[in-house]
C-alpha cells in the first residue's frame, strides 16, 4: 500500500523529534505508517533520503490577505487564491485561509464563491475562507475602512456562512453585533472569533458565552488589559477554552507580551498566523489597499495614517522568530504553526500532525530552519 518512504530526517512526532523513523506515504496522499527506518526498503517502493533535515507537519495559516503580489480583496478569483497559496508554500505553508478584510457584500460573496471553486478544483492548500470584518469596531479599525463597517442582516449572515466545502472563519467585534447573530453564524457551521474590538471584558465574555472560539491577532486592534478594565486581552488570556492567533514578526507584539500570553493560556491555545500582505513571495514591496498604495519599509507594513497594515511575514520566519525571539524549542514553535491551528480550525484529526491517517502535508527545514521541501497530500515540491 505504501509507495514511498521518507527517511533520514528528524521527524516531529507529537511532542518530540525522532531520528530513527521512516514516514510511509500511500497513493492517496496520506501518511500510511511510521516504522523503524530499517524497515523502509521492505515496506515501500521508493525510499527518499531527506538529508538529515527537520521534518514537520506542514504549516497552517488562518490569516493570509495576500502573497505573490496578489491581494485577495483586489482579486477574488480562483487564480488569485492559487497564486497566494503558491507564494506561501515556499515558506512551508501547506494549508491556509485566504483572508478578506472588510469589504462590500458583493466582494464578500465573490470571495466565498472563489474559495468554493478553488477547493472544488483542488487548488493546493486552500482550506476555507477567513472573513475579517466588516462587523468591527471603528475605534479599533487598524487599516480596515470603517465606512464599510455594518451589522449583517439575516441574508448577509447566510451569505457569509455559505461555504459548504471548507472552513469559514469570521472575525467580528462582539460588541458591534447582536449575540444572536454570533449564535446564528456558529449554528451555520462558522468559526467566529473576536478581533478589531473595543469591547469591555463583560462584552467579550458575553461573546465567548455565545460561541466565540477565539481571538484574531491577540493584542493587536483590541481593548488592552488594564487593572480595572481587563478588556479583550484580559478576557482572552483568562479564558481556558479559546484559541488566539498571534503575529510573531517582532513588530506587532513585544516578545515579553507573547511570553505572558504563553504563560497565561493553556498549552496549545496560541497559534501562529502571518496576516501576510502581497509582498510575501513577491519582488514588489508595494500594493494597493482601498485605492491607497502601501509600501513595506524594512519589513514593516503601514498605511498613510501610520496604522500597521498586515505584515510582510511568512510562516517559516514566524517559526524561527518563536525560537529566536521568544526562546521556544523548535518542536513547540512548529506545533504552534501546525498542530494548534489545525485543532482551532476543527481539522486536527486530518491535519497538523505526522501520524498514520493524517494527510501527508509536510515541510522539511534545513539546519538554518529554511524551507527545503513541502508536501501537500503527498505531492512534493522542492524550494530552489
Ligand atoms: Zn486585522
Image (cartoon, rainbow, N blue to C red):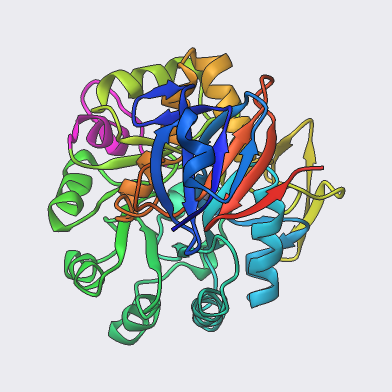
Residue 142 in the image, given as x and y percentages of width and height: 54, 47
Kindly give the residue lying farthest to the bottom in the view shown. 155
Q: How many tags in the picture?
A: 0
Residue at x 64%, y 25% (from the top left corner)? 369
Residue 141 visible in this rendered orientation of the protein: no
Q: Is residue 280 left or right of residue 360?
A: right
91 in relation to 147, above or below: above
- Taking depth in this image into account, of 355 and 307 the one nearest to the observer is 355
Residue at x 54%, y 39% (from the top left corner)? 41
Residue 310 in the image, given as x and y percentages of width and height: 61, 46
Q: Is residue 58 left or right of residue 260?
A: right
Kindly give the residue lying farthest to the front in the view shown. 42
Q: Is residue 371 left or right of residue 272?
A: right
Residue 4 in the image, given as x and y percentages of width and height: 55, 49
Residue 125 in the image, given as x and y percentages of width and height: 55, 60
**Residue 81 lies within the magenta run:** no
- Taking depth in this image into account, of 322 and 277 the one nearest to the observer is 322
123 in relation to 24, above or below: below
Residue 326 visible in this rendered orientation of the protein: yes
Residue at x 15%, y 58% (from the top left corner)? 210
Residue at x 26%, y 22% (from the top left corner)? 264
Q: Hey, which quadrant is residue 242 in on the image?
A: top left
Kindly give the residue lying farthest to the right in the view shown. 283
- Taking depth in this image into account, of 298 and 371 the one nearest to the observer is 371
Q: Hey, which quadrant is residue 138 in on the image?
A: bottom left
Query: Which quadrant holds the C terminus?
Result: top right
Look at the image and give the residue range highlighted in magenta. 222-240
Query: Which quadrant holds the N terminus?
Result: bottom left
Amino acid at each position: 500500500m505504501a509507495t514511498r518512504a521518507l527517511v533520514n530526517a528528524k521527524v516531529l512526532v507529537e511532542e518530540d523529534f525522532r531520528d530513527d523513523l521512516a514516514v510511509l506515504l500511500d497513493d492517496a496522499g496520506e501518511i500510511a505508517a511510521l516504522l523503524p527506518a530499517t524497515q523502509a526498503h521492505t515496506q515501500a517502493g521508493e525510499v527518499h533520503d531527506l538529508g538529515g533535515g527537520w521534518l514537520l507537519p506542514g504549516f497552517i495559516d488562518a490569516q493570509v490577505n495576500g502573497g505573490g503580489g496578489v491581494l485577495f480583496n483586489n482579486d477574488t478569483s480562483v487564480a488569485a487564491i492559487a497564486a497566494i497559496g503558491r507564494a506561501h508554500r515556499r515558506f512551508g505553508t501547506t494549508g491556509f485561509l485566504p483572508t478578506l478584510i472588510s469589504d462590500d457584500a458583493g466582494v464578500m460573496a465573490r470571495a466565498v464563491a472563489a474559495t468554493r471553486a478553488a477547493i472544488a478544483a483542488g487548488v493546493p492548500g486552500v482550506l476555507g475562507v477567513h472573513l475579517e470584518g466588516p462587523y468591527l469596531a471603528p475605534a479599533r479599525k487598524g487599516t480596515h475602512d470603517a465606512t464599510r463597517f455594518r451589522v449583517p442582516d439575516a441574508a448577509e449572515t447566510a451569505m457569509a456562512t455559505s461555504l459548504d466545502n471548507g472552513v469559514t472563519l469570521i472575525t467580528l467585534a462582539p460588541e458591534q453585533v447582536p449575540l444572536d447573530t454570533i449564535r446564528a453564524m456558529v449554528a451555520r457551521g462558522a468559526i467566529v472569533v473576536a478581533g478589531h474590538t473595543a469591547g469591555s471584558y463583560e462584552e467579550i465574555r458575553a461573546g465567548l458565552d455565545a460561541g466565540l472560539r477565539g481571538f484574531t491577532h491577540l493584542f493587536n486592534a483590541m481593548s488592552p488589559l488594564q487593572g480595572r478594565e481587563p478588556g479583550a486581552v484580559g478576557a482572552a488570556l483568562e479564558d481556558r477554552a479559546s484559541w488566539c492567533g498571534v503575529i510573531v514578526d517582532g513588530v506587532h507584539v513585544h516578545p515579553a507580551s507573547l511570553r505572558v500570553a504563553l504563560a497565561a493560556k493553556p498549552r496549545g491555545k496560541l497559534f501562529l498566523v502571518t496576516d501576510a500582505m502581497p509582498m510575501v513571495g513577491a519582488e514588489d514591496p508595494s500594493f494597493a489597499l482601498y485605492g491607497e498604495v502601501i509600501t513595506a519599509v524594512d519589513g514593516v507594513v503601514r498605511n498613510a495614517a501610520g496604522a500597521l497594515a498586515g505584515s510582510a511575514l511568512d510562516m517559516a520566519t514566524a517559526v524561527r522568530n518563536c525560537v529566536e525571539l521568544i526562546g521556544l524549542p523548535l518542536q513547540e514553535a512548529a506545533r504552534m504553526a501546525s498542530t494548534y491551528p489545525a485543532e482551532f480550525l476543527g481539522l486536527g484529526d486530518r491535519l497538523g500532525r505526522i501520524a498514520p491517517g493524517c494527510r501527508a502535508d509536510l515541510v522539511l527545514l534545513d539546519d538554518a530552519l529554511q524551507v527545503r521541501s513541502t508536501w501537500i497530500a503527498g505531492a512534493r515540491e522542492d524550494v530552489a
